[in-house]
Image (cartoon, rainbow, N blue to C red):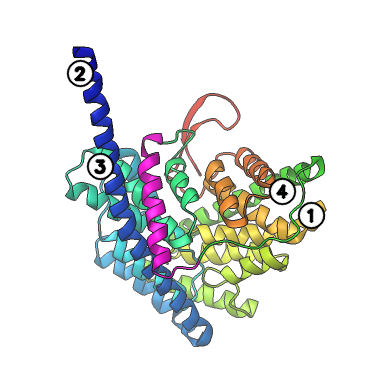
Amino acid sequence: MNEYYAKGRQAAGLLVSFLRWVVLASLLGAGLGAVSVAFHHGIELAAELRVHHPWVLLFLPAAGAAIVLLYRACGMAHDRGTNQIFVCVRTAQPVRLRTAPLIFVSTILTHLVGGSAGREGAALQLGGSVGDKLGRALRLDERERRVLVMCGMSAAFSGLFGTPLTAAVFALEVVSVGVMYHAALVPCLCASLVALEVAKLLGAPAAGYAVAAIPATDLLSLGQAAAMGVLCALVSVLFCRVVHAAPKLYGKIPIHPALRGALGGVLVLGLTFAVGSQDYNGAGGHIIGLAVEQGQAVPWAFLLKILFTAVTLGAGFRGGEIVPVLFTGATFGCAAAPLLGMDPAFGAALGMAALFCGCTNCPMASTLLAFELFGGQSLPLFALACAVAYMTSGYHGLYSEQKIMYSKFHTEWVGKNAH
């Protein structure tokens, strides 16, 4: 009798825990879904203003200095961005709530003046900081707060980008490569899905691209996909090294950090004039669309996007790295596809997913990204390209606080940071 009573209490406890997490995650997802829509509209409005009034690019130096000074004034001069969120998930170290409004305002300002940056990385910081603050307000213990931080990451990513499965799995997979936080699966999915539904109710556009000429899965296409994975791994290493090197190079210049921000603005402005277009300013979503849906891309566009992004973020401008990664992958894949005998548009789609994987070390999330953006056709080709890019990119990654827990080549523990 006592055994049945104990089992009944255990089952009741599990049910209560399940319902509690569903409610908490859903509430967080609803709130961050609304915030994500506001963030999306703010960035879109900033981009439209820049396109219709190109003279705002002249404010790049002033904006770079202003963002640096804003963070210093708020006591966040040494803020580590998305890396700080990873530390919070792994160790429950607190994240200041001011991270959310700071990244919100500074990212929109970066896009307004033409800095090359994304938005999803910023969303991870926004969502993670809100999740951590909610957990502390509710007096949750360290383990529960870590789950809520991952829920916030998932919700903000999903509400902004419209890919709920990718968002949930990315939060579980990206912090410690080789170890997924399965205990957070249900909460992250709830937060992600609710955020998406709230975003749709508030008018957020649906994610996805219409990819033409999707090949059948056969030995030839499998070989082509694997080759694309290897090439994207090499480009991902280049992307990560250049982006990591940029702030170190800026740091060697013996001037005030605000002047480094201004210098970065001058450099981005000079690059823009040298190129003769705004294709590499901001997120560059229209260039991704041209590559994936029409198979059109300048062969060297991926190199220019890497340069613009490194110069922008290294100087102290704020924003995410993920959309620049997708831009780089789409344009590189489009240019490289004919060399492999592939359709340029499909190569662009394959390149997006594979380069995302090479830079983030998240093969499951990358495969789901391909599914949610391009549909289920030829999913094995995307999965293979992502897997190959994951393995052949080594231990490089966008985030220095990302831990590679297990070797990519052997079943052994390595526990080293991505670089």
**Callout 2 amino acid:** Tyr
Tell me where the magenta segment starts and ends, as one range.
182-205
**Foreground label between 4 and 3:** 3
CA gap, disc 2 and disc 3: 22 Å
Question: Residue tagged by mark 1?
Answer: 342
Question: Residue tagged by mark 2?
Answer: 5
**Quadrant of res 255:** bottom left
**Foreground label between 1 and 4:** 1
Local packing at callout 4 (Cα closer than 10 Å; few below 14, some 14-19, many 20+) is: many
- Residue drawn 21% across and 24% down? 9
Q: Are marks 2 and 1 in contact (CB under 8 Å)?
A: no
Q: In the drawing, does residue 46 fall left or right of residue 209?
A: left
Q: Could you say whether the residue bearing mark 4 is in a helix, strand or loop?
A: helix
**Callout 3 amino acid:** Arg
Q: Is residue 203 covered in magenta? A: yes
CA gap, disc 2 and disc 1: 63 Å
Question: Residue tagged by mark 3?
Answer: 20
